[in-house]
Image: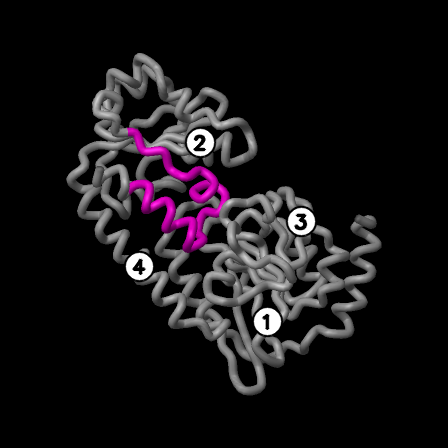
Amino acid sequence: MRTLVLALLSVLALAACSSPSAGTSATSAGSATASSWTYTDDTGNTITLPAKPQRIVAFADQALSLMSYGVKPAGIFARVDVKTDPRFAGADLGDVKILGTSYGEIDLEALAELAPDLIVTAARSTGAYDELSRIGITIDLTAKYAGAFDPDAALVRAKQLGTIFDKNDEVTKLADAITAKQQSLQAEAKKAGSALLLSVSGGEYGAFGEGSRFGYFFDTLGFTPAVPAAELPGAKGSSHGDTVSNEFILKANPDWIIAFDRGAATGEPASAEQTLTNELVAKTTAGQNKQIIYLPASELYIVINGLTAIDRVLDSVHGALTT
């Protein structure tokens, strides 16, 4: 890859030749007319194209959503190699240019050579927004705070994508299925008893309560917190949760433990199950009744709000509650 400076020099030249003029009024999401296409993203930036975009480059998570609607991107950048990413298993990537295979690295020169009509970022790729917008028209599809698991916000974004790319029927089908699954889980969770939500990394735990970035399991699904958020130890509002111990878990004695392997999600060896397999956790109601749910870590922590990722997270909870 040539240096960033050289890449930006070349891409700025491309952008100067192909950027559309601004001036069309903003909309709440996206709109298309016979002569123009307009969208206002989460940064408050309104863009206008002369027509619906055809050549799209997207961050892997958004690429997955687009492909599920039948929209094939021209290029994908990702935090891992999409050719070995199980989420892309069976996907036709033959004509798709892979522009990045590790977090924070994007081949800007190769991206510019694709001359995309539109670049789509979200969640963990938003830090590259300024660089990407120098190459071409860029929108940010982050659903709320980048680290929060928020299916309701994701459904709103999915419907906007459906409108943007004329895929309303496909999006509606996926969204309705997730909504129905969520409603079923709400009934199951309210009967399940208390729960403790834990991230696990390097042999340590972080606990999350109501109102946190993973508060969805309490606030929306309706699990009863084994320990209210106000009573969790540690610094409040930590993005990695309040640090707790096996002794804390035993004292909390949750009916269910809902855990995800933060280390595995960020490329470290998996350790959640091994860490939770100990004599103190075994004494809890969750341990005795084998009521420990291991959420798909990458989908919860990295992908966050892709519809496929949300579906897999909800499936993992549903499967545990109904077996």
Q: Which residue is mark 4?
A: 177
Question: Identity of the amino acid at label 4?
Answer: Ala
Question: Identity of the amino acid at label 1?
Answer: Ile
Q: Which residue is mark 1?
A: 47
**Closest to the observer, 239 or 118:** 118
For the residues bearing labels 2 and 3, Cβ distance under 8 angstroms: no
- Which quadrant would the C terminus be assigned to in this image? top left
SS of the residue under disc 4: helix
Task: Please tell me how crowded label 1 is: few (under 14), some (14-19), or many (20+) other residues with Cα within 10 Å.
Answer: many
Which is in the foreground here, disc 4 or disc 2?
Answer: 4
Would residue 36 be counted in the magenta stretch?
no
Residue drawn 24% across and 47% down?
Answer: 185
Which is in the foreground here, disc 2 or disc 1?
Answer: 2
Q: Is residue 69 above or below residue 218?
A: below
Task: Please tell me how crowded label 4 is: few (under 14), some (14-19), or many (20+) other residues with Cα within 10 Å.
Answer: few
Mark with earlier residue (1, 3):
1
For the residues bearing labels 4 and 2, Cβ distance under 8 angstroms: no
x, y percent for residue 9 = 82, 59
Residue 313 visible within the image: yes
SS of the residue under disc 2: strand
Q: Which residue is mark 2?
A: 261
Which is in the foreground here, disc 1 or disc 3?
Answer: 3
Question: Identity of the amino acid at label 3?
Answer: Gly
Q: Which residue is mark 3?
A: 100
